[in-house]
């Protein structure tokens, strides 16, 4: 009786194809926000009143924050107070901020498997209080660059810039602004910002805060096999069917006498 060659190598090959087809593919997700060319102009609203316009700034505060979250658990979080740079690198990406009196920048990148729940965040804030002389205005201007580039449905990237100002004169809210610019999965764009806070006949005080946030993350959507991977999977299943058919045929004729025989073995490369 002839021995039929073992089908183990073929089955091993197909098992590898099955595993590879359902393994998570890698994704790269980026987001960034940049507030640049920040300027504050002091404007005299009544040049003929004989009172010089004036602005006094105090209480400047800047903060930066980076975090890496995995399955809703914060694995790493770092803060920095004051101007300067803050950056951190993790296995699946990194984040950084840059803070100066005229610039706020934050960026985050995720580069890792798609079948997971992980997020990376970067953000910074810039705030200051001020007082204004009567008939004086402060005009705040800046350019805001936003970017977000997730490649597919399982990824999420977003960037956000918030600019907020408040002014009070004799305990009454005289003027204010709240502006936010957002980018969610729509590429890169630039917005121009310009707002004013001003006094009336009396001196007043107020504050303004600029805030940035950049987020990049994955939300656990199972990876979809690539077309080439599906083709390999179908080819492997066909190989299994072919081996099974020939095994039955060889067993049916194994009792016949043959003058010679040749055994072909399949070794996956």
Image (tube, rainbow, N blue to C red):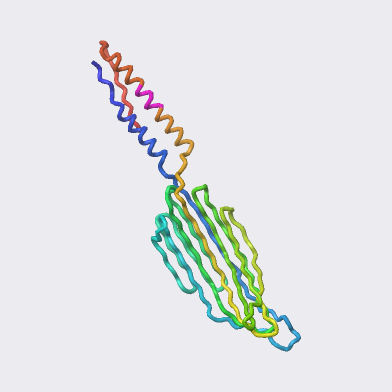
264 on left or right of 214: left
Q: Give the quadrant of residue 267.
A: top left
Task: Name above or below for residue 148 compared with residue 178.
Answer: above
Estimate the x, y position of residue 240 in percent, counting from the top left: 37, 27
| Main secondary structure type of the part rendered in magenta | helix
Q: Give the quadrant of residue 249.
A: top left
Estimate the x, y position of residue 8 in percent, counting from the top left: 30, 29
Estimate the x, y position of residue 34 in percent, counting from the top left: 56, 64
Q: Which quarter of the image is occupied by the C terminus?
A: top left
At x 58%, y 77%, the residue is 207
At x 48%, y 51%, the residue is 28
Give the residue at the far left of this rendering: 1
Q: Residue 239 lies in magenta, yes or no? A: yes
Task: Name above or below for residue 195 compared with residue 250.
Answer: below
135 on left or right of 126: right
Q: What stretch is highlighted in magenta?
A: 238-244
Between residues 236 and 268, which one lies in front from this camera angle?
Answer: 236
Q: Give the quadrant of residue 165.
A: bottom right
């Amino acid at each position: 009786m002839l021995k039929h060659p073992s089908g183990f190598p073929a089955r091993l090959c197909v098992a590898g194809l099955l595993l590879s087809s359902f393994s998570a593919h890698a994704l790269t997700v980026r987001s960034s926000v940049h507030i640049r060319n920040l300027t504050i102009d002091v404007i005299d609203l009544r040049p003929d009143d004989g009172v010089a316009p004036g602005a006094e700034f105090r209480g400047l505060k800047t903060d930066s924050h980076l975090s890496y979250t995995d399955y809703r658990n914060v694995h790493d979080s770092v803060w920095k107070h004051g101007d300067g740079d803050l950056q951190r690198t993790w296995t699946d990406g990194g984040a950084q901020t840059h803070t100066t009196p005229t610039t706020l920048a934050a960026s985050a990148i995720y580069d890792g498997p798609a079948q997971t729940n992980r997020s990376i965040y970067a953000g910074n804030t810039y705030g200051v209080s001020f007082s204004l002389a009567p008939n004086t205005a402060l005009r705040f201007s800046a350019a805001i660059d936003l970017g977000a580039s997730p490649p597919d449905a399982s990824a999420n990237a977003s960037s956000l810039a918030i600019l907020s100002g408040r002014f009070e004169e004799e305990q009454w809210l005289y003027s204010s602004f709240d502006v936010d610019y957002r980018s969610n999965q729509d590429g890169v764009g630039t917005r121009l910002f310009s707002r004013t806070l001003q006094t009336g006949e009396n001196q007043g005080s107020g504050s303004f805060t600029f805030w940035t946030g950049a987020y990049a993350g994955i939300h656990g959507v199972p990876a979809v096999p690539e077309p080439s991977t599906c083709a390999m999977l179908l080819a492997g299943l066909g190989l299994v069917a072919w081996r099974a058919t020939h095994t039955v045929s060889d067993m049916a004729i194994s009792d016949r006498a043959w003058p010679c025989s040749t055994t072909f073995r399949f070794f996956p490369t």
